[in-house]
Image (cartoon, rainbow, N blue to C red):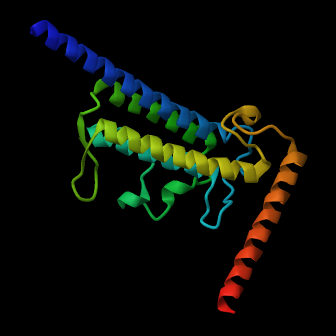
Amino acid sequence: MTGSSDSEADVENDIHADLKNDLTVYLQDARDVLLWKLEGLSEYDIRRPLTPTGTNLLGLVKHVTGAEALYLGATFGRSFAGAPRLWCTGEAEPDADMWATPKESRERLVGLYRRVWAHSDETIASRPLDALGRVPGGPPKELTLHRVLVHVIAETQRHAGHADIVRELVDGAVGLREAGHNMAPGDRARWADHRDRLQRVAEEAGRSARDATSGRRG
C-alpha cells in the first residue's frame, strides 16, 4: 500500500511540475514578445500615444512590470522595491503606470522589468501551485499560485496584443517575432491590397445592412 501511495504521489508531483513548467514557458514567451516590440525604435516612438486613451509601447512595459511585481511578488510576501505603483490599487494617480516620464529611460524600465522577471521566477520556483497568496489592497483576496500565474499570463499576453497594434502603427512591423513570424507572407503592396479589399467588404456589408433596415421600415 505504501509503495502504491508513493507512486501516485510521484505521478501527481510530475504532473504539477509539468504544469508549472508550461505556465512558466507561456509567461516568458509573453514577456519576450512585449519587449521585442520596442526594439529598433527611438525614445520618441516607444512613448508615442497612438490611441485616444494614450496607449504606448513603453507605458505597456511599465504597467506589466508593476502588475507582475504585485501578483508574483507582494501577493506572496515578497515585495519588490522600486516597482511601478499601479493606479488601479490607489497607489498612484490615474494611469500613472501606463506611461513613462522623460526621466524613465528605456534602459531603466526594461532593466527593471527583467529584474522583476527574476524575482517572480523565484516565487514560482519556491512554491507549489496550490500555495495561497493574498493580493494587497482592496477586500481580502486569497489566490493560489496557479490562479495568479494564469492571471499574469493573460494580462501580459493581452498587453502584448496591444503592443502588436501600436508597433504596426509606428512603423508597420508586425508578427510575433522578427521577420513577421506567424503572419501570412506578403510585402507592403500585398498588405495594402488586402486592406483595400477588406475596406470594400466592410462598405458592402454596411450598405447591405442599411438597405435591409430601410426595407423593414418600408
Whole-percent x and y of residue 33? 60, 37
Residue at 71%, 33% in the rendered image: 181
The percent coordinates of residue 100 (x first, y second) are 58, 52
In the image: residue 91, left or right of residue 187: left
Taking the view exactly as shown, the residue that stands out farthest to the left is 1
Q: Is residue 91 visible?
A: no
Residue at horizontal 73 percent and vertical 43 percent from the top? 174
In the picture as drawn, the residue positioned furthest to the right comes out as 189
Which residue: 67% across, 83% down? 213
Closer to the camera, 35 or 6?
6
Counting from the top left corner in percent of width and height, residue 156 is at: 50, 44
Instruction: Left or right? Give the position of 91 relative to 127.
Output: right
Quadrant placement of the C terminus: bottom right
Between 89 and 33, the one lying in front of the other is 33
In this view, which residue lies farthest toward the bottom? 218
Is 44 situated above or below 125? below
Residue 137 as seen in the image, left or right of residue 5: right
In which quadrant of the rendered view does residue 119 lie? top left
Residue 50 shows in this picture: yes
- Above or below residue 28? Residue 46 is below
Please name whichever residue, 58 or 194, is drawn nearer the observer in this view of the structure: 194
- In the image, residue 209 sits, relative to residue 150, either above or below, namely below
**Residue 81 at x, y percent in the picture:** 38, 40
Which residue is pictured at 14% across the width and 14% down the height?
5
Q: Nearer the viewer, residue 126 or 45?
A: 126
